[in-house]
Amino acid sequence: EVSGRSHFGSSRAASEGFCGASFFFLVMKVINSQEFVKIPKGVEVEVSGRVVKVTGKYGTLERNFRHLPVVIEKYGKKQTVLKVEIWFGLSKHLACMRTVCSHIENMFTGVMKKFEYKQRLVYSHFPINVNILNGGKTVEIRNYLGEKCVRTVMMYPGVTCRKSEQTKDELIIEGVDIDNTSMSAAKIHQSCLCKKKDIRKFLDGIYECESGTVDKD
């Protein structure tokens, strides 16, 4: 079966003993643990060491996992599955293995469907004005709570912002990398936080209303 987790050896055993005035703990390691990630159709994957490069419809992503003690390689006769493997790992290492699989799955989703975050401009009296410059890579926010200062937010690499054509006062942030896309949306939200006022009364700001992918299933 190409999905799920398999373990060989003892899952984890801990014993506690007393030696003089100090305690010592014995924790057994899992001999071998594996996770499998199926490669979708239309996606090309290159694995070099622990560097994974994914190419799809919307571009190319590359991620380095050399800081983790995992083995990543293609698996199966048709090489349509990625195997993530750890030898002699503790529970902390096994958790990292599942994290690596989640990162790779997000890379597949990004190059196939592209991530999308939608945000709404919320104001009660002073309308928030947003200008999008530099081909969607720079966002200028003006007149927040009547302030004269201009808030400038730079998007992360590979992320663009645009105004929605169907909905008034809505911004759409799109990108292939889920980390850069979500952090760009967070930067826009955090640039319009209400300071030194009662946030129950002053609700003005830019808030996320929807997140997902550009290509719907």
Image: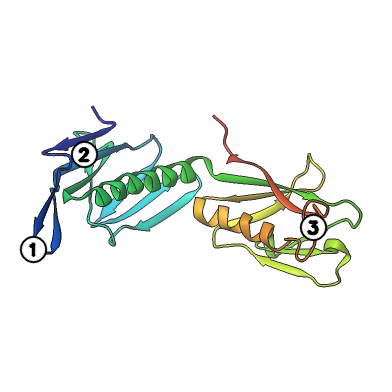
Which residue reaches farthest bottom? 149
Left or right for 36, reference 204 = left
First of labels 3, 2 by sequence position: 2
Where is residue 122 drawn, in percent x and y?
80, 50
Q: Dot 2, how many residues are within 10 Å of its Cα: few (below 14), some (14-19), or many (20+)? A: some
Place of residue 29 in the rendered image (x, y in percent of width and height, measured from the top left)? 14, 48
Q: Secondary structure at mark 1?
A: loop
Which kind of residue does numbered mark 3 sit on? Answer: Asp
Residue at the disc numbered 2: 75
Q: Which residue is mark 1?
A: 20
Q: Is residue 124 above or below residue 105?
A: below
The residue depicted at 26 percent of the width and 30 percent of the height is: 2
Image quarter (top left, top right, bottom left or bottom right) of the N terminus: top left
- Asked whether residue 183 appears in the rendered view, the answer is yes
Residue bearing mark 3: 198
Return the x and y of residue 167 as percentages of the image width and height. 79, 41
Q: How many marks?
A: 3
Tell me the crowding category of disc 1: few under 14, some 14 to 19, or many 20 or more residues within 10 angstroms, Cα based: few
- Please tell me whether mark 1 or mark 3 is closer to you in this view: 1
- Mark 3 → mark 2, Cα distance in angstroms: 56 Å
Residue furthest to the front: 21
Question: Residue 12 placed where, x, y %?
Answer: 17, 42
Q: Which mark is residue 147?
A: none
The local secondary structure at tag 2 comes to: strand
Of all residues, the one furthest to the left in this rendering is 19
Amino acid type for the residue under numbered disc 1: Gly
- Compared across the picture, whether 130 is left or right of 114 comes to right
Mark 3 or mark 1, which is nearer the start of the sequence?
1
Identify the residue shown where x is 19% and y is 48%. Answer: 86
